Amino acid sequence: MTIHHHPGDETLLRLAAGTLGAGSALVVAVHLEGCTRCREHLAGFEAVGGAILEEMPPAPLAADLFGRTMERLQAIPSTPVREPPPKKQPALGIELPQAMRHCEVGPWRWLGPGFHWSKVKLAESPEAKIMLLKGRAGLHLPAHGHTGLEFMQVLAGSLSDERGRYFPGDLDEADDEVDHRPVVGRESDCICLAALEGDTRLHGILGRLLRPLVGF
Ligand SMILES: [Zn+2]
């Protein structure tokens, strides 16, 4: 699988710093699963971040805080951290990525002719705006813009807009500047995982369709 579209450096830095929204972080985590290049970039950013932290002079309160934190840590019984069991997910016609195994995923729901969506929920961030979108082969999606960042990872099929063509493994970051009109490739249906960052709102008919359903 050749990946042509990756998250930007700023997005990977925000992921490393823990400041990326939960929904966007999930979409990027799905991308990282299949992208060695971005995993390496992220590891580089994390290493730099760690070095900066190490070089920072200790704060005056830190010594006492450190002692108390160590006491607390020693008091915690050393049972291994158990990951929550994977959620039971509906049959959506594709195998969902590993990064989504703890998500609550709804069934496909009709959104328009040839166009379906499924709500994706994260237990720890129920407010995150995340969804799976499925478009029929050859479908022209309504033109839309947004007031913030939209992250989208292609899971199956392909999609193109004025900026290029996106295949499985590709991640698209669209900001305020982008007003696009995606078209689904003719070879098969396209399934994408999408997240809107923070207060991002979709404009145009797509926004009007989705807003009453998902509150976007
Ligand atoms: Zn990548």
Image: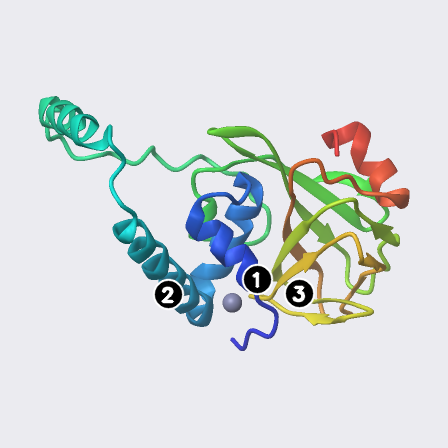
Question: Splitting the image into 4 quarters, where does residue 4 fall?
Answer: bottom right
* Extreme residue in the front direction: 60
Left or right: residue 73 compared with residue 127: left
Q: What's the mark number on residue 157? A: 3
Residue 119 place in picture, x, y as percent: 64, 36
Q: Earlier in the sequence, mark 3 or mark 2?
A: 2
35, above or below 131, in the image: below
Q: CA distance from mark 1 to mark 3?
A: 19 Å
User: Which kind of residue does numbered mark 2 sit on?
Assistant: Gly
Question: In the rendered structure, are the residues bearing label 1 and label 3 in contact, judged by CB atoms less than 8 Å apart?
Answer: no
User: Which kind of residue does numbered mark 1 sit on?
Assistant: Pro
Pick the front one: 64 or 15: 64
| Mark 3 residue crowding within 10 angstroms, few (<14) / some (14–19) / many (20+) | many
Q: What's the mark number on residue 25? A: none
Instruction: Find out if the beta carbon at label 1 lies less than 8 Å from the nearest ligand 1 atom.
Output: yes
Q: Which residue is mark 2?
A: 44
Q: Which residue is mark 1?
A: 7
Q: Residue at x 69, y 49 (%)?
A: 149
Q: Nearer the viewer, mark 1 or mark 3?
A: 1
Q: Residue at x 41, y 64 (%)?
A: 39
Question: Splitting the image into 4 quarters, where does residue 90 fall?
Answer: top right
